[in-house]
Amino acid sequence: MKDDTSARLASPLPLRPRPRVLVIGAGPGGLASAMLLQSAGAEVTVLEKEAAPGGRTGALRQGGFTFDIGPTFFLYPEIPREIFSACGYDFDAEVDLIRLDPMYRLQFEDGRRIDATADVDRLVEQVARIDAKDAANVPAYLEENRRKFETFRPILQRPFLSPADLVRPDMLRALPKLRPWATVDTELNRWFQHPDVRVAFSFQSKYLGMSPFKCPSLYTIIAHIEYGFGVWHPRGGCNAITAAMARVAGEMGVDIRLSEPVERLVLDGRRATGAVTAQGQYDADAVVMNADFAHAMTTLVPDSARKKWTDKKLASKSYSCSTFMLYLGIEGSLPNMAHHTIAFSGDYARNVEEIDAGQAPEDPTIYIQNGSATDPTLAPEGHSALYVLAPVGNLTGGVDWQAIAPAFREKMLTRVSKLAGRDIRPDIRTEVMFTPDDWQSKMSVYEGATFNLAHNLGQMLNFRPRNRFEDIDGVYLTGGGTHPGSGLPTIFESARIASRLCADDLKLPDADELTTRMPKEAAE
């Protein structure tokens, strides 16, 4: 009888099945998580309710014009560079970045302006037009925020999973700079006495959907991210970033399923084991949630399955402002308008108070992107693509937006026309309007709060929903509703944190290759 011992020993061992991960939502956090987890060894499926990837960082295309739905400022490209690199790709080969200088124009009601630039000498000259004494403090202020950013960088790159994380050494080192009693505005008052100069360095709190008079002083570091790392425009818009991520994820083997909204999570006790769509049930070893947090929890998960983040608890939380949007395709060029312009209300403090009260501001501050001035791909030849945004109260204020939207639109068009130097109304060739109602009904944003949970001290760090979700085992959170918070850089960082936690828990073979280190220095 033939001895087949050697043949048996040479036979390959059965392959261990790859852990399956479901990602709910193809926004930037979901796509980054999908890339990283696929790279680490998981079998990843993305379920997206829309017909195209991107979520709020997707594109709106109409009449030959391209508009970003949401973010138009692109900051801190170092993080997606590292995400792409970890997956074996070159971000700069996939996305064509244009550095803007000036970064943006700050326009005051009386005609004065600051063309913000990362060139500190030129920035000092610009601020001196408002106040010479304050201008002299600009270099020291920027240096202070650089040091502050370096102190908080380790905190923004790691998860907060228990109260013990609040007293780790990096937090204790950072406490003197946290100044929890101070707001962004009061922190700036240490450096600048003129209210317009303080507004010029504090409007960035609106990236978080918050008032500078309430936003914790930690977030003055956003100004450093702008001035230290630059403001960029991806050719084609910020939607080009998520389009590149979806393209790369597909090449890596991620299964991205569009037009397939999730109806509910599948739970086994307190563990998530998959999700159900109209096409059937997807089983999974882990679920990464990239949908709007409060909306997803109140629609996809039974209230009884959530002990800490119940419907009642979510309703009691503070939420960011909303936005009123006009996406305008204009015939002709607009040479008087910068790529980015923030036109402040004549009474900025009152404007912010009205937003905090959930109202439509009487004299709104508006933001205009005239992106086709830099990027002609956004509009047909001889035309301009205008993105116009006004921060407004979210839906908790009870405003009847259907009733007031036409008048509010007129108010915004009047402001834009003044900045453009001509009435743009006769030149509008295509238009889309978004109100807070639309953010809720069309984009599934809880209470129309476009920047998610507010970033007050009681809703930061350990007090925010955790990246490894505390209420349901096997669920990991990414996006603006979890740590570190809203804004593209922090959403990308949340994806790195959530992916590393998930990869470690699933014992993925290449989990150690995932990094949560934020890059230290700006690229030359």
Image: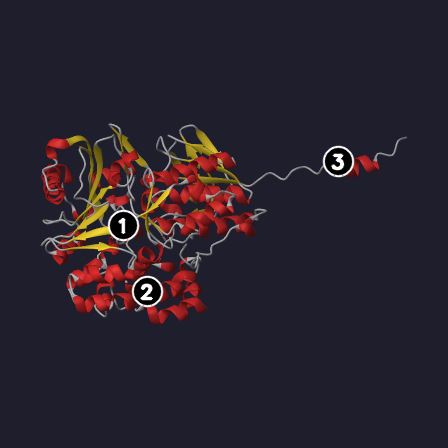
Viewed as shown, does residue 311 lie left or right of 427?
right
In terms of sequence position, does the residue under pointer 3 or pointer 2 come before the other?
A: 3
Of 379 and 20, the residue lying toward us = 379
Q: Report the coloring of the rendering.
A: secondary structure
Q: Determine which residue is flagged by label 1.
A: 315
Q: Circle 3 sits in a helix, a strand or a loop, which is it?
A: loop
* Distance Cα–Cα, label 1 vs label 3: 59 Å
Q: Determine which residue is flagged by label 2.
A: 145
Residue drawn at point x = 30 percent, y = 48 percent: 100
Tell me the kind of residue under disc 2: Asn
Few, some or many C-alpha atoms within 10 Å of disc 2 (few <14, some 14-19, many ≥20)?
A: many
Q: Residue furthest right?
A: 1
Tell me the kind of residue under disc 1: Ala
Q: Circle 2 sits in a helix, a strand or a loop, which is it?
A: helix
Residue 34 place in picture, x, y as percent: 46, 41
Q: Determine which residue is flagged by label 3.
A: 11
